[in-house]
Amino acid sequence: MTNFPWLSVVTFLPLLGVFFILLIRGDVETVARNARSGALWTSLITFAVSLGLWINFDNSTADFQFVEKVEWMPGLGLTYHLGIDGISMFFIILATLLTVLCIAASWVSITERVKEFMIAFLVLETLMVGMFSSLDLILFYVFFEGVLIPMFIIIGVWGGPRRNYAAFKFFLFTLAGSVLMLLAILTMIFEAGTADMTVLLTHDFPLGLQPWLWLAFFASFAVKMPMWPVHTWLPDAHVEAPTAGSVILAGVLLKFGGYGFLRFSLPMFPIASADFTPLIFTLSVIAIIYTSLVALAQEDMKKLIAYSSVAHMGFVTMGAFAANIQAVEGAIVQMLSHGVVSAALFLIVGVVYDRIHSREIADYGGLVHRMPSYALVFMVFMLASVGLPGTSGFVGEFLVLTGTFQVNAWVALLAATGVILGAVYMLYLYRRVIFGQLTKESLAAIRDMNGREIAVFAPLLLIVFIMGIYPEPFLAVMHVSVENLIERYESALAAAQGAASVAAK
């Protein structure tokens, strides 16, 4: 099956579903029903094909696999070039899985413009998978920025009362950083004479140019993560987005920044990355502590989870720039774990929001009496977010803190306080929503989760426990690629130090 175009199929299969959905005709109810079914079957097949990447993946090599290369714009030297390694593979599977769950979760809650909603999600899936599998700089940028369009539409059309404000804020923040990245990409192409990322990963960029390229990419990736202080768009976007929009935003889109740091910043600009590591550590620690404290003050469930996402992404940036195998693997596991856990937490908010149309913590209390299954599922994901041993959240945070401790003990110690604060705000949320007396009249007749909702949470629960109890299958895939990344990084630093000492003599 080595000649099978796995990546092209996974990337563009959703567009086939879009084509069929566009052909649907009939009354409003018929169109909505067929659009839902068409989108669900398309996303399920795409997810099944994406699992083929994992089954056929060779863990023993750091080379890019499933490579496809076709001339795209010969005059400009641009190619349609796809390929994945151990760093990018799981993000594709995460994107395809969450798309399935988002469509299933929106089955009842989305009642207007259902056809357009499903099309937006399938287009979004194509762009997300394309971004993680691109090996051409311009192709990467097209997918990277293309994601903004369907996400902007999802927030702006199906969002809450302040959806226009949130959608434009999201769009402008992310676009502003990306303009600088485009300038850096063009500079790199002129400097190296190619847009091929496999060549650029081994190209030595001049020492005087590296800091500027690094800062330009940082401007884009920091907003996408988002890092403090450019995180302010995230709570607004989450609060106003429909449940499925929040799930894909937290589960996949926030990973673009972390993936970008590991794919571009560290291997392509190693000297600049080493020079800016203190800055990253400082911003990461501030993000972990500050946004955890802000989360404590929230009265809106979605806002609380949004701020917790910023804190969790602080661990990712810290682990990535600690630049040892443990920390980087921890950063990738943390991204995958957060993708699953935060997606689940937003789905959990969506379950009760669909019933009483409120996200305010004060409007709940005593749900355990009416919704025992819901309380159990909520507890599992809440504890995974906290980082309880046996859950996926523990593995990522433990590896990051262990790896960072080897580089800077104080940074690791300060970041560890974020784990304690995370436990405080998540337990506070759980206590107020789930426990206590059921006194609110609006909750008197609230129903527990139905079969469809349980089916949405089942795969997420399974992943949380598998990653937490036996993470080896995940670590085995990424280990050789991470090892290769760290070796390149360290050899570049050693070469630069050697050159500096010769020059000093």
Image (spheres, helix red, strand yellow):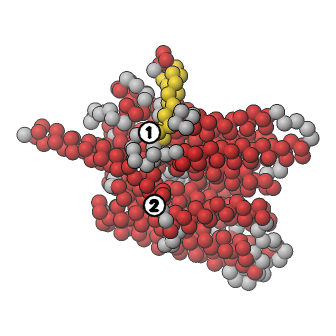
Q: Residue at x 53, y 75 (%)?
A: 424
User: Where 74 falls versus 419 (above or below)?
Assistant: above
Residue beneath disc 1: 64
Give amino acid for label 2: Glu
Residue 126 percent coordinates (x, y): 63, 39
Q: Residue 87: x percent and y percent?
A: 45, 47
Tag count: 2
Q: Residue furthest front?
A: 1
Name the side, left or right, on which 48 lies relative to 357: left
Viewer can see residue 216: yes
Look at the numbered discs 1 and 2 and tell me whether their residues touch, using CB distance below 8 Å.
no
At a point 44% along the width and 57% down the height, the residue shown is 475
- Residue at 64% across, 47% down: 47
Q: Residue, x 66% and y 77% (percent of image)?
A: 432
Where disc 1 sits, the SS reads loop
- First in sequence, mark 1 or 2: give its number: 1
Outermost right residue: 27
Q: Dot 2 corresponds to which residue? A: 472
